[in-house]
């Protein structure tokens, strides 16, 4: 699949700019468990996947830069010394943001042309944004020999998202997309920004995604609100981040926070513990426990952290009705996008059909099912 994307961006690049480009593939990600824990300095368990963004990039000698998003049939021209955020929701903000964050490190970037094409469905919660940011920073680093480490690059991508896109995201998505490892998920400590790879081989079970194909509005502001709520509760507790707090600590400030925010902080503390337990369950090959943790994660995201929606809750309820689905939950920021399901291989097709039919009946729209391969992170394609 990524081979086709690469072929397409290369072809258009050569036709448009008459030069041979560098080719980059930057993947999206899934997350087994550990949602909304990353910006609380906690643990997450993501993996890069075989869906992503292909980019073709080369220096420009025309005095300006051009970026082409093939999927959107959109071309923009820009100059590097006049960068500022475009209107909210514009795809070019990911490109401008990355360039501008590199410049903020007093690193000089030359003019360039870039062509993108991707196959991560927008709004699926599989982080097409991190894939796009990483493809730009990785491409520029190669092209201009900027000397950035992979860690530098993900911090640049993350800052681009904060300052140009307006989402105060954690580091999970950029990390998973950059450092992903074939057939592995990464148990990432978001405080030290170091991870341990776990080989994912669930034998007669597998991971399956179901995309609700909805993305409810206001999700960015709801995300930022939750991050600020977590930070202010950590401050009240006198700790650096909620990762440092226990449920008992939280009880000491019960009178000082709203019940809604109390539940949110409790969710974060519990989800962090679940993510650590999930690593053990995977090591032990204990899929029943892993599945139960995944269901608990959804319950917390829906009832405590309040980032789910009717469509996601419905798909998780469908999963619960099928004994071959060991666990299911919403994945990513929330308010739409995919559920991730831990399901018996023999039942996957059947459940995909039953759930899709029920979803159509209930919401009068289609969901989409994806079987993904865990893949390597952002890389040059030779
Ligand atoms: C989004 C963010 F970008 C991540 O940093 C993370 O917080 C995730 O939502 C929720 O776990 O994908």
Image: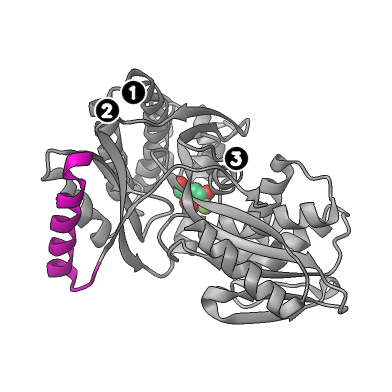
Q: Mark 1 to mark 3: distance in Å?
A: 23 Å
Measuring 52% from the left and 57% from the top, which residue is drawn there?
2
Q: Residue 248 sits in which quadrant? A: top left
Residue 310, placed above or below residue 248: below
Residue highlighted by disc 2: 287
User: Which residue is rendered at x = 38% and y = 41% of the image?
Assistant: 262
Q: Is residue 169 above or below residue 272?
A: below
**Residue where numbered disc 3 is placed:** 179
Q: Can you give x and y, in whole percent of width and height, for residue 75 in the image? A: 65, 81
Res 281 label: 1
Residue 356 located within the stretch drawn in magenta: yes
- Which element type, helix, strand or loop, lies under badge 3? helix
- Is residue 300 in sight in this rendering? yes
Q: What's the distance in space between the residues labelled 1 and 2, CA to CA?
A: 7 Å
Question: Relative to the observer, which residue lies in front, 14 or 93?
Answer: 14
> In front: 344, or 311?
344
Q: Which residues are magenta?
A: 345-366
Is residue 245 in sight in this rendering? no
In percent of the image, x 26 and y 26: which residue is there? Answer: 289
Residue 161 pos. (x, y %): 62, 59
Q: Residues within 10 Å of mark 3 (few under 14, many from 20)?
A: many
State the SS at label 1: helix
Label 1 close to label 2 by CB (< 8 Å): yes
């Amino acid at each position: 699949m990524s081979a086709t994307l690469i072929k397409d961006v290369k072809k258009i690049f050569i036709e448009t700019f008459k030069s041979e480009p560098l080719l980059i593939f930057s993947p999206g990600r899934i997350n087994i468990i550990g949602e909304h824990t990353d910006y609380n300095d906690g643990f997450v368990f993501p993996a890069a996947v075989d869906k992503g963004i292909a980019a073709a990039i080369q220096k420009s000698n025309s005095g300006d830069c051009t970026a082409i998003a093939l999927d959107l049939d959109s071309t923009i021209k820009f100059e590097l010394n006049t960068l500022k955020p475009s209107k909210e929701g514009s795809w070019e903000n990911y490109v401008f943001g990355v360039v501008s964050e590199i410049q903020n490190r007093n690193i000089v970037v030359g003019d360039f042309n870039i062509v993108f094409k991707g196959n991560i469905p927008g709004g699926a919660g599989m982080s097409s944004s991190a894939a796009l940011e990483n493809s730009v920073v990785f491409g520029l680093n190669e092209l201009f020999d900027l000397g950035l480490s992979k860690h530098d690059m993900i911090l640049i991508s993350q800052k681009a998202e904060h300052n140009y896109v307006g989402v105060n995201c954690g580091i999970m998505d950029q990390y998973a997309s950059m450092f992903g490892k074939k057939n592995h998920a990464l148990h990432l400590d978001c405080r030290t920004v170091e991870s341990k790879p776990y080989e994912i081989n669930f034998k007669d079970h597998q991971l399956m995604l179901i995309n609700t194909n909805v993305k409810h509005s206001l999700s960015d502001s709801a995300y930022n609100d939750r991050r600020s709520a977590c930070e202010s509760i950590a401050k009240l507790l006198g700790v650096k981040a909620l990762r440092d707090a226990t449920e008992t600590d939280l009880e000491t400030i019960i009178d000082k926070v709203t019940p809604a925010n109390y539940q949110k902080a409790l969710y974060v503390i519990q989800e962090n513990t679940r993510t650590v337990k999930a690593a053990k369950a995977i090591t032990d090959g204990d899929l029943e426990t892993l599945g139960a943790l995944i269901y608990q994660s959804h319950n917390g995201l829906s009832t405590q952290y309040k980032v789910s929606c009717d469509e996601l809750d419905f798909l998780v309820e469908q999963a619960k009705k099928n004994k071959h689905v060991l666990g299911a939950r919403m994945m990513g920021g929330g308010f739409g996008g995919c559920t991730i399901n831990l399901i018996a291989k023999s039942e996957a097709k059947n459940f995909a059909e039953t759930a899709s039919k029920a979803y159509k009946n209930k919401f009068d729209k289609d969901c989409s099912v994806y079987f993904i391969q865990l893949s390597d992170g952002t890389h040059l394609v030779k």
